[in-house]
């Protein structure tokens, strides 16, 4: 592929931890379409692009031509019209993330002109509380939602629960802590599953996201008994977490949300 076939450029790349990074991409010669917080865009690179050293070697290059294309949730606010931000991890056996991870500021790639997805606030009533639960880079759509919708004056409360193995894998932690301090109606809870591997003792929550729900951590902080009548739950990330949470919530009367059958559980599956 010729460089002229690309239509976007990397504005900035920030490494959160080895193999975990934040990428800002801007269109070249065209304008980003309007989108809703929580939606996704498509990125692309050719199979000839180099792979990250942390990735597994490929037996043979992908047969996708002329570009390897994948969808990724947008982390930037829908109010930003000049760039899109993505929160990505190197999937060792993946085709595209190991190549995207090698890009640096000023390098070019392909960005799909359409933005899609149904994992938004559209199906969430404005007067109910919202608990966002994410593992790893499943936090990305929530960052877009929070950056777009979080308002200190709104009546409902919003909580973001983020799970990772280690504290250094908790991307956006500083920004989320700042959001919590600036917005009395917002709660941020981080949980790590391998506290014994922390170089400095971890003083936060320990375990998995499911454990936070079982321990009623959010309800205790808000002084509210959460129920399907006053709370919607959003799930994004590891399929095991999602399936277990759907079962847990189902036992408490929550139902999966569908257009034709509205419920209180909103799911985005990355895998």
Image (cartoon, rainbow, N blue to C red):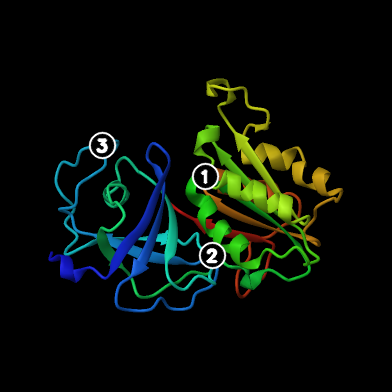
Q: Dot 2 lies on which element?
A: loop
Q: Is residue 159 left or right of residue 103?
A: right
Residue at image mark 2: 38
Residue at image mark 3: 53
Q: How many marks?
A: 3
Q: Residues within 10 Å of mark 2 (few under 14, many from 20)?
A: many
Residue 107 visible here: yes
Instruction: From the top left corner, tell me how far across and down residue 131 is, in percent.
Output: 69, 54
Q: Residues within 10 Å of mark 1 (few under 14, many from 20)?
A: many
- Point out the tag, 1 or 3, that comes first from the N-terminus: 3
Residue 243 visible here: no
Q: Is residue 252 left or right of residue 266?
A: right
Q: Quadrant of the N terminus?
A: bottom left
Q: Is residue 72 left or right of residue 243?
A: left
Q: CA distance from mark 2 to mark 3?
A: 30 Å
Q: In the image, what residue occupies the spot 70% across and 50% down? A: 180
Which residue is at the front of the view, 214 or 140? 140
Which residue is at the front of the view, 48 or 253? 48
Q: CA distance from mark 1 to mark 3?
A: 21 Å
Q: Residues within 10 Å of mark 3 (few under 14, many from 20)?
A: some
């Amino acid at each position: 592929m010729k460089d002229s076939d690309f239509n976007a450029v990397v504005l900035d790349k920030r490494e959160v931890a080895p193999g975990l990074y934040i990428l800002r991409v801007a269109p070249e010669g065209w304008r980003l379409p309007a989108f809703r917080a929580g939606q996704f865009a498509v990125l692309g690179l050719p199979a000839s692009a180099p792979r990250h050293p942390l990735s597994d070697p490929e037996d043979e290059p992908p047969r996708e031509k002329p570009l390897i294309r994948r969808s990724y949730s947008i982390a930037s606010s829908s109010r930003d019209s000049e760039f899109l931000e993505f929160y990505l991890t190197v999937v060792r056996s993946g085709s595209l993330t190991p190549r995207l991870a090698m890009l640096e500021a000023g390098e070019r790639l392909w960005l799909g002109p359409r933005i899609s997805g149904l994992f938004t606030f559209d199906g969430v009533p404005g007067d109910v509380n919202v608990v966002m639960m994410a593992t790893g880079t499943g936090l990305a759509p929530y960052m877009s939602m929070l950056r777009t919708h979080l308002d200190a004056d709104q009546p409902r409360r919003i909580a973001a629960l983020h799970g990772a193995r280690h504290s250094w894998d908790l991307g956006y932690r500083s920004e989320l802590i700042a959001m919590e301090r600036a917005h009395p109606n917002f709660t941020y809870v981080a949980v790590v599953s391998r506290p014994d591997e922390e170089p400095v003792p971890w003083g936060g929550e320990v375990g998995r996201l499911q454990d936070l729900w079982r321990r009623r951590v959010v309800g205790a902080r808000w002084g509210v008994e959460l129920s399907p009548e006053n709370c919607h739950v959003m799930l994004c990330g590891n399929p095991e977490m999602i399936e277990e949470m759907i079962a847990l919530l189902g036992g408490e009367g929550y139902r999966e949300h569908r257009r034709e059958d509205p419920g209180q559980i909103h799911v985005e599956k990355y895998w």
